[in-house]
């Protein structure tokens, strides 16, 4: 059985984030004590995310309290980035699309 051209993953159109202009915080901070909200309530987290608008550090949706999503909903800040080692992806809550740091315009 042969493969037809254009039927692979690379040929899929990728959606884009329309909120790139809100990204003020791109880099991972040197010191990361943990999820700011979990630390206040004695909670725990699985992975950490950084609000790209204000720099707030919160926990991912696999964590019990899902503080990154809550922060976006409460503040209207649309984009966050993973601050896990070796990860350079961002997520836009509004457009529901992930993108790499390379997609950000030059400052």
Image: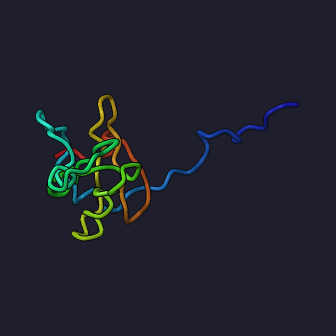
Placement of 9 over or under 39, stated as above or below: above
- Seen at 42% across and 55% down, the residue is 16
On the image, the x and y values in percent for residue 60 come to: 34, 50
Residue 55 visible at all: no
State the residue lying farthest toward the left.
31
Q: Residue 72's quadrant in the figure?
A: bottom left
Q: How many marks?
A: 0
Q: Is residue 29 left or right of residue 8?
A: left
Q: Residue at x 23, y 48 (%)?
A: 50
* Quadrant in the picture for residue 68: bottom left
Residue projecting furthest to the right: 1
Considering only vertical position in the picture, is 87 above or below 41?
above
Instruction: Tell which of 12 and 49 is nearer to you.
Output: 49
Left or right: where does residue 50 sit relative to residue 30? Answer: right
Q: Residue at x 33, y 60 (%)?
A: 69
Q: Position of residue 70 (x, y in %)?
A: 29, 64
- In depth, the one of 107 and 50 nearer the eye is 50
| Rendered location of residue 83, percent (x, y) | 26, 39
Quadrant in the picture for the N terminus? top right
User: Looking at the image, what colour scheme do you see?
Assistant: rainbow
Residue 92 lies, with reference to residue 6, above or below; the image says below
Q: Residue at x 62, y 40 (%)?
A: 9
Asked whether residue 32 is in view, the answer is yes
Position in image of residue 13 (x %, y %): 56, 51
């Amino acid at each position: 059985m042969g493969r037809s051209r254009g039927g692979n993953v690379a040929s899929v159109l990728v959606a884009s984030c329309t909120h790139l202009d809100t990204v003020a915080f791109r880099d991972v901070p040197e010191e990361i004590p943990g999820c700011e909200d979990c630390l206040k309530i004695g909670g725990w987290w699985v992975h950490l995310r950084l609000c790209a608008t204000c720099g707030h550090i919160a926990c991912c949706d696999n964590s019990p309290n899902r503080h990154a999503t809550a922060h976006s909903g409460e503040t209207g800040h649309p984009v966050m980035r993973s601050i896990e080692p070796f990860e350079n992806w961002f997520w836009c809550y509004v457009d529901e699309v992930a993108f790499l740091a390379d997609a950000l315009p030059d400052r």
